[in-house]
Amino acid sequence: MSTKQPVKDWATDFDHTDPAWNNDPYPIWDDLRKRCPMARSERFEDGAFFPSRYADVREISYDTEHFSSRRVIVREKKFNPVMPAPPITSDPPEHRPARMPLLPAFNPKAIEKLTPGTRALCNRLIDGVIDKGSCDAATDYAQHIPTRVIANMLGMDEEDGDRYRRWIKMALEEGIHDNSKVTESLKEMTIYFGQELAKRSDMPGDDLISFMRDQRVDGQPLPPEKIIGTLRLLLIAGIDTTWSAIGASLWHLAKNPQDTARLVAEPALMDTAVEELLRAYAPVTMAREVKKDVTINGCPMKAGAMVLLSFPAANRDPEMFPDADKVLLDRQENRHAAFGLGIHRCIGSNLARMELRVALEEWLKRIPQFRLENPAGVTWSEGTVRGPRTLRVVWK
Amino acid sequence: MSEPKKFKVHVETALCQGHNRCYSIAPELFEVDDLGNARARGDGAVPPQLEEKARLTVKNCPEHAIRMTAKN
Ligand code: HEM
Ligand code: SF4
């Protein structure tokens, strides 16, 4: 563990794992947007930039000529060799062929089929806590929904969630400071998925692991390391992200009973409410590596530097969203970037939206009034994916 | 007789990244292919009662891929 210095000036020394950022990043971003929309930090190998304006995040997302996805996490020490997880770590021209085969499994019709099962799952989870009058909405409820759904899609053991979430925590959180955690997580996942592939070698299946095994490019199966890279990505991207979105939404509702009452009274508001909660509490911050020297918004960037690509900060830019700091459940115009912009648009966006919506609908049907047990006791995951990890709520 | 349709919607295929916001706001006006990319249904004509929804799809598409133009 490194001993970190407290941040003195966010404009020249930002740290997205600092406790102040982790507890409440929004005032920091608002301040930076006004005085230094392209912040810097030397805390990370080769330096890192942090654009806080929507326009800059958008420009960088679209500019695959100067910005590479081969590293999508800003770490203290760069992880070498890079960890391929196609398509999220792929640049053109490799990106499209790696992405295309996955798309049909996540289109609106495919996701619609998963809705009844997800509703039933939410209700089973609520059955387990409702009589207690209180629970940890992050660990008793939110975390199980995406874990079980993606485990089922992949054809993996849905009871093994603790193991999956440990790998993710090592890769995304602990791995920012300690590369050995990334190595350990990678190694374990690679062995695990290798075994899952071997299990399916002579048996047909309709899960995503079998589907990846059956892919052919020019008549040839994909090399196992590519398949395993993609499977790691689906597991990592499918769990903490949506867990965070559900948790942050419940956190908001627990603190804002007038919003909760409105959603209960006007269920038709759910369409815009889901988008607004995704905008305001967007959980996922990615990164890019500068591939060729470039100047963005007057700020020169050298090849090799990292960019913290914060869709959450873009979503709070008042130039793009009037009343950006307010949660307006009926916001009509909401071009938010929670699922990214450009070619890497989240493949799981339809799935995540469905899970978030169903999780809130079923919760509100049965627990229409609830509040935080101890506002100071809420804890958040840090770094790439930010969402509540302890969220005690009461309803009795 | 239905009222004349004054507007049509169009999806710029090269810009669409399949966020499917248009399809969830106005499934009457848009359809989505297997890969999640959107296109306008039929010739894209917008019935008057859907004009407001059509405007909202234009303003919610994260990729600015939807155009709404006067029909001639
Ligand atoms: C609320 C939940 C989620 C959020 C906020 C979210 C956010 C994002 C973002 C911002 C990106 C773009 C990355 C970039 O530009 O570098 C992305 C990519 C991706 N997401 Fe999600 N995600 C969520 C849930 C999911 C789920 C449930 C899955 C399903 C397995 C998933 C799978 C993926 C994949 C495969 C990519 C890579 C796409 C590509 O590079 O072409 N995500 N996600
Ligand atoms: S909202 Fe825009 S990007 Fe998304 S599917 Fe529709 S046209 Fe395509």
Image (cartoon, coloured by chain):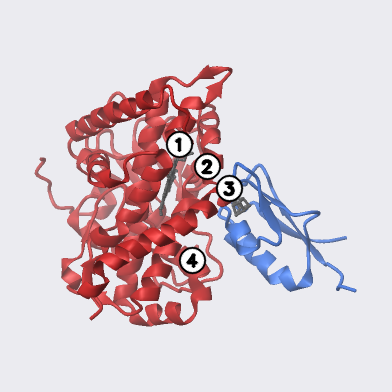
What chain does badge 2 belong to? A
Tell me the SS state at disc 1: helix
Give the drawing colour for chain B: blue
Q: Which mark is residue A321?
A: 4
Asked if ligand 2 lies within 8 A of label 3, the reply is yes
Host chain of mark 1 = A
Label 2 with label 4: CB-CB less than 8 Å: no
Q: CA distance from mark 3 to mark 1?
A: 20 Å
Q: Decide which of B3, A267 is in the foreground and name it.
A: A267
Nearer mark to the viewer, of 4 and 3: 3
Between marks 4 and 1, how big is the CA–CA gap? 38 Å
For the point 27% across and 46% down, which residue is it? Answer: A159
Q: Nearer the viewer, mark 4 or mark 1?
A: 1
In depth, the one of A314 and A23 nearer the eye is A23
Chain ID of residue with mark 4: A
Q: Dot 2, crowdedness within 10 Å: few (<14), some or many (≥20)?
A: many
Chain with red colouring: A
Q: Secondary structure at mark 2?
A: helix
Q: Is residue A185 left or right of residue A145?
A: left
Asked if labels 1 and 2 touch by Cβ distance under 8 angstroms, the answer is yes
Q: State yes or no: discs 3 and 2 in contact (Cβ < 8 Å).
A: no
Say which residue label 2 marks: A105
Q: Which residue is mark 1?
A: A208
Question: Which element type, helix, strand or loop, lies under badge 4?
Answer: loop
